[in-house]
Structure formats: structure tokens, C-alpha cells
Image: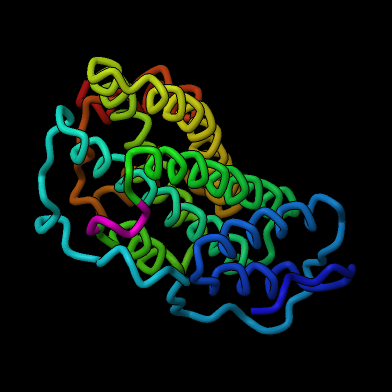
Amino acid sequence: MNELVEKSQSSLFTEARRCLDVSELEDKIRFTQRLAALWREGGLTLREEGPPQVAVTAGHPPNPQLVSVRDLPKRSFHTPIGRAALFHSIAHIEFNAINLALDAVYRFRGMPEKFYSDWLQVADEEAYHFGLIQTHLQHLGYEYGDFTAHNGLWESAQQTAFDVMVRMALVPRVLEARGLDVAPGIMDRLARAGDDKAVEILKIIQRDEVGHVEIGSHWFHHCCAERGLDSEATFFSLIDQYMKGVLKGPFNIEARIKAGFSASELNKLQGV
């Protein structure tokens, strides 16, 4: 695949789609980071060269083999292969998060420039996270693709492709926010297993993911305000519609507040 353009006046949407289509791991990371840099340097425009494709299959390597969630093997933190499988699952989440951020940039037209800056920042940081995790996975003797994985995150992108408001509600504020809830427990278990490097990496990711969920919160509220909708009522209506009205706790209250959740929302999530 050709390199990203190096000249000004190329369309951000065209180049984001090119990044989205890349399958090879190193190219995906490199192209994503270059795309973010080109945007920061003013080398891309918001000129549209055609509407977004309705259904996009994001580029990904031939491995890992994708299976249903129920077919993923359960492994113990207390074994080296179990910790490697955990890091592989996190690597898969981060790889999908790169594609999710790129898809938001490519798909949702007519948003303020800050929207594209925010989601390119997210894509850039997710690429950095993937590199950290891949390096540690290699230290453990494995590569991304050595274990099976599921496609739930990308399926959520396809299910929310029709509306930026729904995407912002259900991907950052539901799926990615769940990571804020479970990360402290995972870090505690890894610390007890003596994997201090893994804990250090997850602390970096947790810090950045709070910001990513906050970006989702900001743009969800922006969309609701533009449409004259009550954001809290809309959020819970979407949970009823798409998540059967239930989000699994316990919730990381401190992290979710930093990520843009209101006290009222958190009380409702906890059933208070």
C-alpha cells in the first residue's frame, strides 16, 4: 500500500479510510501515527470526496482467529500462558480501538474540527498502547495473533455506524468505560503475580482511557444539545434499546466522574 500523502490539501476522510483499510500490524500503527501528525501539522482538509461507505470491514491481520465470546478459553492469572492470554486480549482491544477511532473520523461528517482532532488523538494513543502491549507480549514469548479473540468491539462499530450520537453513547461511554471499571482489579492481580511491568503499562493505558471516555462523553453531550435532547434520558434510553437496560458493575466511580459521567448517571447505573 502506498504511503500517506505528504502534501497539503488531501482529504482527512480519504486518508482515514486508507488507514482503516490497512491490515498489516506495523503499517497500521505507522499510518495511524502519521495521519495524526499530518492533521496536527495542518496537512489535511475536511473536503469530502464522496460519502462514507455504509458497511466497512476494517483491515486486520489474518490472525488472531475470531471466535464467539463463549468459545474463548478461560485461563488463570497464576500461569505464564494465562497472563500472556490476558495481554493478548488487551492488545486485541487496543487494535480494535485504533480502528474504532479511525472509523469515527472517516464516517461522521459535518462535525466541528475539534471532533476530528479528538478522535485522531485517540487513534494515535491507542496505537501507542498497542505498541506497549505488543512489546510486553513478546517479552512473555508470544505475538499478537497467537491466541483466539472475538470481534465484539468492531461489531459495535457496525451497529452504531448510522448515528454519531449513538456511537458516542455506546462505544466510549459503555464499552470503553467498562475498561475503567475492571482495570484496577486486573492491575492488583498482576501485581500479586509479580508482573510489575504489566502493571506499569496498564497504568498508562488507564490514564489515557479516562481521557478517551471523556471525549466520548463530551461529543455525546454535544450531539444531544444540538438535537434538543436531555442527555441523561437519552443515554439510558439507548442502554434500554441496545444493552437490555443493564450495565454490569461494579463501577469505578472516581474514573467515571473524570470521564464525564454525572453523579445522577452513576446513581442510576448503581440502582441507587
Whether 138 is among the magenta residues is: no
* Residue 221 visible within the image: no
Report the residue at 46% width, 71% height from top: 58
Q: Position of residue 257 (x, y in %)?
A: 45, 22
Residues drawn in magenta: 143-148
The residue closer to the viewer here, 43 or 30, is: 30
- Image side of residue 69 versus residue 159, left or right: left
Horizontal placement of 101 versus 124: left or right?
Answer: left
Q: Is residue 156 above or below residue 259?
A: below
- Residue drawn 48% across and 46% down? 130
Question: Residue at the location (53% across, 35% down)?
Answer: 214
Q: Is residue 252 left or right of residue 16?
A: left
Visible in this render: residue 29? Answer: yes
Nearer-the-camera pick, 207 or 60: 60
Q: Is residue 92 above or below residue 230?
A: below
Give the quarter of the figure containing the C terminus. top left
